[in-house]
Image: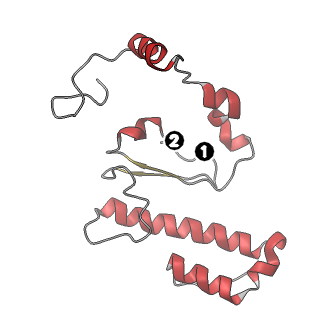
Amino acid sequence: RIGFSEYSMFPTRRWTTEWLEEHCAARFGTSPRPTDLAERWGFDDMGSSGASRILFTNGMNDGWSVGGILEEPLSADMPVINFPNGAHHSDLSHIGPSEADTEDIKKGFSAIRDILASWLEDLLCSEGVSMIGSDRAVQDHLNLNLRTGRQVRCK
């Protein structure tokens, strides 16, 4: 049973693919297409499709996590961070981590900050954005907002 229990706001009901197909046809005039993303945009093989710098995060207490990218790594620059105690959007606060967060959320915030700081540093130092990379105000802003404690240093 998916998302239904005596403790849920939804009544208990047996879930099957057939039920879902009938429900979607009756209610929305369409049918589920579970392979559509993979077929249309290659989401089943993003690592070789040229996609890069995508960070996948999942709160495992979030019902939506079943549809997430849960295994890592798809490629070196498409990491996956799963939060065993995370819930819906508990990893997306611009403030966190807080004292109330669990250890996995606290470690995850640190990992996210480090990954994003590294990607931004790479972009700032690449030839394509060298003008931005030399702008002291941009560097100060990134260091302040990411709270990494390190200066952007181009090699």
Q: Residue at x 35, y 39 (%)?
A: 63
Judge left or right: residue 29 versus residue 138: left
Residue 13 x, y percent position in the rendering? 25, 18
Identify the residue under disc 2: 69
Q: Which residue is drawn at 57% across and 82% down?
A: 143
Q: In this view, does 145 lie above or below 112?
A: below
Judge left or right: residue 138 versus residue 22: right
Q: Residue at x 31, y 71 (%)?
A: 98
Judge left or right: residue 114 versus residue 8: right
Residue 97 x, y percent position in the rendering? 36, 69
- Mark 2 and mark 1: Cα distance apart in space: 9 Å
Q: Are marks 2 and 1 in contact (CB under 8 Å)?
A: yes
- Secondary-structure class at tag 1: loop
Local crowd size for mark 2, using a 10 Å CA cut-off: few (<14), some (14–19), many (≥20): some
Q: Residue at x 60, y 79 (%)?
A: 142
Residue 74 tag number = 1
Looking at the image, the residue that sits furthest to the left is 6
Q: Which amino acid does label 1 sit on?
A: Leu
Looking at the image, the residue that sits furthest to the right is 127
Quarter of the figure with residue 26: top left
